[in-house]
Image: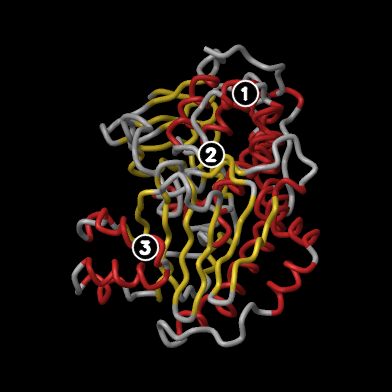
Amino acid sequence: MERTTCCVVGGGPAGMVLGLLLARAGVEVTVLEKHGDFLRDFRGDTVHTSTLTLLDELGLWPRFDRLPYRALTRVRVRLDGGEVTMADLTRLDEPHPMIAMTPQWHLLDMLATAAQEEPTFTLRMRTEVTGVVRDGGRVTGVRLGDGTELAADLVVACDGRDSRVRAESGLPLKRYDVPIDVEWFRLPRHADDPDGGLGRVGRGRFMVLLDRGDYYQCALVIGKGTDARLRSGSIQGLRDLLADMNPWMVGRLDSLESWDDVKLLEVSLDRLRRWSSPGLLCLGDAAHAMSPIGGVGINLAVQDAVAAARVLAAPLLAADAAGVARASTAVQRRRTAPTVITQTAQDLAHRRVVAPMLDAAPGEKDATSIPLPFRVVQRFPVLQWVPARLVGVGALPEHAPDFARRSALPVA
C-alpha cells in the first residue's frame, strides 16, 4: 500500500493552499484531484482581499498579477428607486483592496505550480476517492477509484459540499432551512456597461451581475424548488423576465439560446458540529457549506486551510498522532466563530431580505423609493467600509505562517 503523511482530498482552493503550506513546512503531502485538469467552469471565480494578501505573503503576488483578472472595487445595488453603492473596497487598509475576478483554473494552476516546486508535495490528477479506510475507529487512508488504497497519518477532506469523505465520516451535521436556489448563466457585456459588481433588486426579483470583462457572470435568485416550473416554459420566458428587470440588456438576451445555457445551483447552508475524528479533518465546504450570498465561500475555505497548516505542520512532522488530533480540534475552535458569524448573516439575509422580496408580486414596483438602510449608506459613504470588510476580508483573516512565507518568487 502506498503511504503519505497527509492526504488532501480535493484540489480546489482550500486543498491546494493546504498542500502548498504543509509542503513548505517539509510535510509529505499528497493532493488527490478527480479531474484530469483544472480547465472547467467554476461558479466561484472570486479571489478576495484577504486571499490576495496571503498570496503576497507566500511570494506569489507577482505570479498572480500576471493572470487575467478584473479588479472589483465597488458593489452597487440598482433598485426601482435608484442606485446605491453598498460596498467600497478601496476604503480598506489592505495591500490589495479589491476582489479579483479570474477563472479559478488559473488560480489553481498557479498554486499547483508553486506547490510542485516543493520536494515533499505530490499532486495526483484523475484520482477519484471512493471512500475511506479505517482501522477500528480511526481513518487510516482512502480508497481510490482504481481499486488501490493510499495510507496516511491524516486525511483532510477538501472535496466540497458533496464531499464523499464527509458523507462516510458519520460526523453530525447542522442544516439550515434555505428558501432560495440560484440560476447561473452568462450574458455579453459591452464596454459602456456598468463595471464591478451590480445587484438588481426589485419587487419579486433579485439578481447579481459580476463584471468579467467581455461578459457578465449572472446569478438569478429563485425560490427553492421552483427551477422545474421555470424550465417548464421556453427560454423566452427567462429572457422576458430579464428584460423586465434590466431593459438596457434587451439587445443581448438572445445569447441565452436554450435552458442548457442556464445552470442550477441548489443552495444549501450547513456545518459539521464536529469537523474531525481520529485520522480525519474536514475543511471548507466539506465542513461548512455556504450560501452564495456575499460570495465568501472560497475565502472562508482558504482561511480554514491556512489555520489548519499553521497548527498541523509540527505534529505531522513529528508523527505525533495525539498532537495531530489536538491540532485538528484546534482548527475547528479557531474557525467556528467566523463560520457561525457568516452563516448567521446569510441565514438572516435569506429569511428577512431575499425570501420576502421573492414572495412579493413579480413586477410590482417598489413605492417606497430607496429603503432606509440603503439611504443611510448613501448619506454616509464611510459606512461602505463595513460590507467591504465583511466580504473582502472576513471576520477572522488568517495570515501565512512563518515557515511558508517567501520573498516574491520569480515569474515563470
Closer to the camera in the image, 305 or 96: 96
Percent coordinates x, y for residue 198 in the rendering? 53, 58
Q: Residues within 10 Å of mark 1 (few under 14, many from 20)?
A: many
Q: Is residue 376 above or below residue 172?
A: below
Query: In the shown orientation, is residue 5 left or right of residue 317?
Result: left
Q: Residues within 10 Å of mark 2 (few under 14, many from 20)?
A: some
| Residue at x-position 78% and y-position 69% | 379
Q: Amino acid at mark 1?
A: Leu
User: Disc 3 marks which residue?
Assistant: 183
Q: Residue 60 — which label? A: 1
The quadrant in which residue 381 appears is: bottom right
User: Disc 2 marks which residue?
Assistant: 70
The count of marks equals 3
Percent coordinates x, y for residue 11 in the rendering? 45, 35
Q: Residues within 10 Å of mark 3 (few under 14, many from 20)?
A: some
Q: Alpha carbon of mark 3 to alpha carbon of mark 1: how far? A: 34 Å
